[in-house]
Image (cartoon, rainbow, N blue to C red):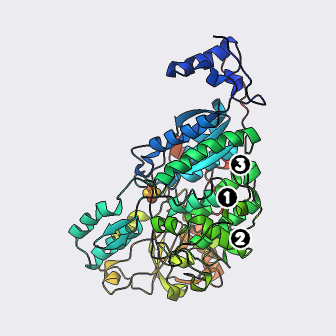
Amino acid sequence: MAFKTAIWPRRLRSQAWYGGTSRDNIYHRGWMRNQGLPADLFDGRPVIGICNTWSELTPCNAHLRDLAERVKRGVYEAGGLPVEFPVFSVAESSLRPTAMLYRNLAAMDVEEALRAQPVDGVVLMVGCDKTTPALLMGACSVDIPSIVVSGGPMLNGWFRGERVGSGTALWQMSEDVKAGKLTQDDFLEAEQAMSRSPGSCNTMGTASSMASMAEALGMALSGNAAIPAVDSRRRVMAHLTGRRIVEMVKDDLKPSDILTRAAFENAIRVNGAIGGSTNAVVHLLAIAGRVGVELTLDDWDRLGRDIPTIVNLMPSGKYLMEEFFYAGGLPVVIKHLCETGLVQKDTLTVSGQTVWDEVKDARNWNEDVILPVERALTPQGGIAVLRGNLAPKGAVLKPSAASPHLLKHRGRAVVFEDIDDYKAKINDEALDIDETCVMVLKNCGPRGYPGMSEVGNMGLPPKVLRKGITDMVRVSDARMSGTAYGTVVLHTAPEAAVGGPLAIVRDGDMIELDVEARCLHLDLPEEEIARRLAEWTCPITPPRGGYAQLFHEHVQGADTGVDFDFLRGCRGKEVPRDSH
Ligand code: FES
């Protein structure tokens, strides 16, 4: 059969591999045909990569092979050639020492795979927390047409007539066992009830927050964030996404066209309105760094201050993602923010339409799930960025998940030098601590842990829990799960392991938190702080060899997104030379 090319209006990138009759073209195309692909599929039509984070070791993404088949249907229908490929899958629930250590590794995998392979556009198949930012970061650094489709959240968890939210219930029940309110057997029985179906965490944790961020940034079709994983409409979303990416290639609609500064400002505001995860801070800063948008921690504070949290979901509220979807999902929230002037209506989305075009017809079907502003969970729902002599480069706190009476607090520091020190001491009845103290955890930041683990919401000591106390002020350079809650100061920068002031806090020092004033203060004379800093020596042994060494040597601070210094920016899609 004679080989024909150029059915597409212009020659696409993939044709450098497939479009011709040279020996190399035959090599590239012929080997692909061992999969039973007819020659005319290489006739110049868009080759669409389906970049899949499917893995049975990433349970939140374990259903993505099925969803990829739906994407393929859409791609074929629209006249493209779909090719699915795997990338490193970052499992929040099982990777050690922490999934965050591997976000940048996955982003590198995605970037290099997209550049090296003959794809004209890509569908980013994501779900569990880090998979969304990792794939977006990698795609942004290549800047070919890209679109996100999420796996969707699990169905509601139910246990003995009560909703049990992913993560949130785990933290709560664990504390209840320590306080003697729940037996270990009850806790074990609740285990299966928490995870009833395929999908990602059903709370407004990091997975749901990042799916919402992808939608708010304009990088996913409207409505993508909330559809449950097992709802047939999730498959429809995947199918439509497959159709759409082919059109995006036709229009050459790239991440750099969509991810403007205005798009990031919109996403920050949406994160406040949904009561989204503090992890969105580091991820959006990192994505912005890839597309060259100047975004800072101060933007988070400024843009979030006047945003009411109106989505009544755990961990800030009461419901779960299933109910959010039934109530109308994220389009309702974005529509509300557009109408009140808090979200810019004219930013572009992957649909080729503006944000406003996508949401203007949305309706709120349940005002107990998506609340009217007058009944907002908290009037200032954004992420509060704290500064002071304990966090010169900033720290974050999520007011909607904190206890109002602790937002202004002065307390005696009880210091844990690292996570092992915390685990060794926290259950000791002799530990000198009560509910007025401030728990301080060091060396859990990007370099210290390594990877910046989600341990900032340290469980309280049993003797405090037994009094019925459920929250204390906690300060660390760690992150916290998006499903967690409490008056928890996170991402303190510079981190202790690089000699930030957190490193020199000692038992008995007084710490002042004033969220309204955005202040985190170590009440010591400046000379004493300077003296201790001069005496400080790093307790961390740098890792030798392998990825851990690369991470240690190149990771940047929480205040700029924990990306590698050499990965910031867009390096484009050009390959230096062909394979022979
Ligand atoms: Fe995967 Fe929460 S652990 S989404």
Q: Amino acid at mark 2?
A: Cys
Ligand 1 lies under 8 Å from the Cβ of mark 1: no
Residue tagged 3: 255
Question: In which quadrant of the rendered view does residue 26 lie?
Answer: top right
Toward the viewer: 206 or 12? 12
**Can residue 60 be seen?**
yes
Q: Amino acid at mark 1?
A: Leu
CA–CA distance in space, label 3 to label 2: 22 Å
Q: Which mark is residue 338?
A: 2
Q: Which mark is residue 217?
A: 1
Which part of the image, by quadrant, shows the N terminus? Answer: top right
Ligand 1 placement by image quarter: bottom left
Mark 1 in CB contact with mark 3 (< 8 angstroms):
no
The residue at 68%/79% (across/down) is: 306
Counting residues from the start of the chain, the first of labels 1 and 2 encountered is 1
Question: In which quadrant of the rendered view does residue 533 lie?
Answer: bottom right
CA–CA distance in space, label 1 to label 2: 14 Å
Q: Is residue 118 left or right of residue 205?
A: right
Q: Amino acid at mark 3?
A: Pro
Counting residues from the start of the chain, the first of labels 3 and 2 encountered is 3
Which part of the image, by quadrant, shows the C terminus? Answer: top right
Residue 433 image offset from top left, x and y in percent: 39, 83
Toward the viewer: 329 or 419? 329
**Can residue 541 be seen?**
no
Local SS, label 1: helix
CA–CA distance in space, label 1 to label 3: 10 Å
Ligand 1 lies under 8 Å from the Cβ of mark 2: no
Local SS, label 2: helix
How many marks the image carries: the answer is 3
